[in-house]
Image (cartoon, rainbow, N blue to C red):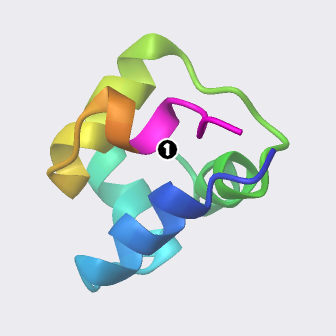
Amino acid sequence: MKNKKMKIARIEKDLSQEQLAELLGVTRQTIGLIESGSYNPTLKLCVAICKALDRTLDELFWPEEE
């Protein structure tokens, strides 16, 4: 499942994948894989992403109700 919420939050903060990756100490590829749904980040990385993007875990990583 793609993480469109994370991508939108990143764009709203005017950050590229590379810039967010640098803030978090990971590679740009890691950010791309998370956004594409190909990689499940650790809880520690999820929390760091939320702090960098000023969002909560629920806002970025909780699946939408269908």
Residue 5 at x, y percent in the picture: 49, 58
Q: Is residue 3 left or right of residue 56?
A: right
Predominant secondary structure, magenta span: loop
Q: Which residues are magenta?
A: 60-66
Report the front residue among 16 and 63.
Answer: 63
Residue behind mark 1? 26
Return the residue found at the far bottom.
Answer: 14
The image quadrant that residue 49 belongs to is: top left
**Residue 44 to residue 50: above or below:** above
Report the front residue among 14 and 6.
Answer: 6
What is the three-letter code of the residue carrying label 1? Answer: Val
Asked if the magenta segment contains residue 62, the reply would be yes
Q: Is residue 25 left or right of residue 34?
A: left
Residue 7 at x, y percent in the picture: 51, 67
Residue 53 in view (yes/no): yes
The image quadrant that residue 14 belongs to is: bottom left
